[in-house]
Structures are given as C-alpha cells and as structure tokens.
C-alpha cells in the first residue's frame, strides 16, 4: 500500500494542535470568564480546521483501489473504474462516474507552470504530483487476457463510492456552533 500526503499541511496542522493545546491549558488555569470560553471555542474550531484541512487529506492505493481522502469526503475508486490519472496542479483521477482532485497531492501554481515549461526528462519537470502519478500507475493491475471460446457478458465495472466523514464534519461544525451560540448569548 502506498500513501501520499501533503507534508507541509500535516506539519502546520500538528504545530497548530500543539499551540492550541498549550493555550487551552492556560485558559483552563486562568481564563474563567466569557472571553476565556470564547477563546477556547475559537481554538477548538481552528483545531477542527487544522485536522480537516491539514492532517486528514491523503491518497492511499493498493492493488484493488485508490482511496482519496479529501477534507470532508472520502472516495474509494476500484482500479477497473479508473480511466486516467492526470498530473497537473493537483492529481486528478478520472473514473467511470466523473473525476476527483486530490487535496493531498498538489503543488503551487508557480511550480506547476515551471514544470510544464521544462523538458519532460529534466529534474524541473519532476513534481510531487508527477511522482505520485507514476507510483500509482505502477500499482494499477494489468488486465490478464483470458481466452474464452464463447463470448460471455462482461459485468459492469465497479463504481466509486463516496462517503462523508462524520469526524471531520463534527470537528469543525460542533465547536463552530458552540462558538456562535456562546457569542450570541
């Protein structure tokens, strides 16, 4: 199994969680006012955002499927449903029912423009997105031809499944709702 993450987002996300935890400890000892409560709820809301936007996104692949975990949704795409893997500013996976871009495998627009202008074999053309695309293509199973004398109906290819992430939604919406409610009271 191969896993691709946005390293900078993970580092910033974890750094923010440590910073917020230290501030929450300070608020627990000193901040017994409404301002302390509002600050704690704001910190918890931003912790949810740090987890959802920085730590959670990833792309996992094995011999059966690619799983794209974006901030609020997770999409599992079986290999037979994958039409193409396209490198660009972000990794785009085109499948039987549409396409999806990965939050985890992406580069800044300036780097993408530089890589697009560079010769294909040069080091400047190699980006994290092209590397991930190459690695994912290496995991794609090759179809094995099976000789059959009579034509058999081919089954429909498996379709991608997309699910909402309850922990990601809860980590952002619950503290945000508490913050808004507390502010209005």
Image (tube, rainbow, N blue to C red):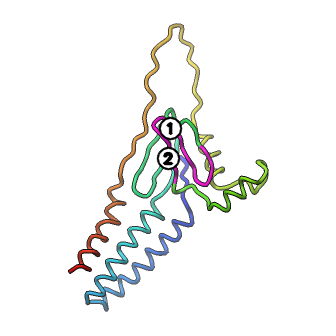
Classify mark 2: helix, strand or loop.
strand
State the extent of the magenta-drawn residues as a range.
86-102
108 and 144: which is toward the camera: 108
- Could you tell me what secondary structure mostly forms the magenta stretch? strand
Residue closest to the far top: 149
Q: Which residue is mark 1?
A: 95
> Looking at the rendered structure, which numbered label has been put on residue 73?
none
Q: Residues within 10 Å of mark 1 (few under 14, many from 20)?
A: some
Q: Which residue is mark 2?
A: 100
Percent x, y for residue 34?
Answer: 26, 87
Q: Residue 111's image quarter?
A: bottom right
Q: Residue 162's image quarter?
A: top left
Residue ID at (46%, 63%): 53
Percent x, y for residue 141?
Answer: 57, 33
Quarter the C terminus occupies:
bottom left
For the residues bearing labels 1 and 2, Cβ distance under 8 angstroms: yes
69 and 176: which is toward the camera: 176
User: Magenta segment: does it hold 14?
Assistant: no
Lateral position of residue 123 relative to residue 68, left or right: right
Percent x, y for residue 157?
Answer: 45, 29
Residue ID at (45%, 37%): 97
Tell me: residue 81, above or below residue 156.
Answer: below
Percent x, y for residue 120?
Answer: 76, 48
Please tell me which of labels 1 and 2 falls first in the chain. 1
Tell me: residue 55, above or below residue 160.
Answer: below
């Amino acid at each position: 199994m191969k896993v691709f993450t946005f390293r900078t987002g993970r580092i910033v996300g974890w750094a923010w969680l440590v910073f917020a935890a230290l501030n929450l400890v300070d608020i627990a000892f000193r901040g017994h006012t409404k301002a302390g409560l509002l600050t704690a709820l704001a910190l918890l809301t931003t912790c949810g955002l740090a987890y959802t936007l920085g730590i959670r996104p990833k792309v996992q692949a094995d011999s059966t499927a690619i799983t794209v975990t974006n901030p609020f949704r997770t999409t599992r795409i079986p290999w037979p449903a994958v039409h193409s893997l396209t490198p660009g500013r972000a990794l785009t996976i085109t499948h039987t029912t549409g396409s999806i871009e990965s939050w985890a495998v992406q580069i800044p627009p300036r780097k993408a423009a530089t890589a697009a202008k560079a010769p294909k074999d040069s080091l400047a053309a190699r980006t994290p997105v092209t590397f991930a695309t190459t690695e994912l293509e290496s995991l794609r199973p090759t179809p094995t031809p099976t000789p059959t004398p009579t034509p058999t109906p081919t089954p429909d290819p498996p379709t991608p499944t997309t699910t909402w992430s309850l922990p990601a939604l809860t980590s952002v919406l619950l503290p945000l709702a508490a913050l808004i409610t507390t502010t209005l009271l």
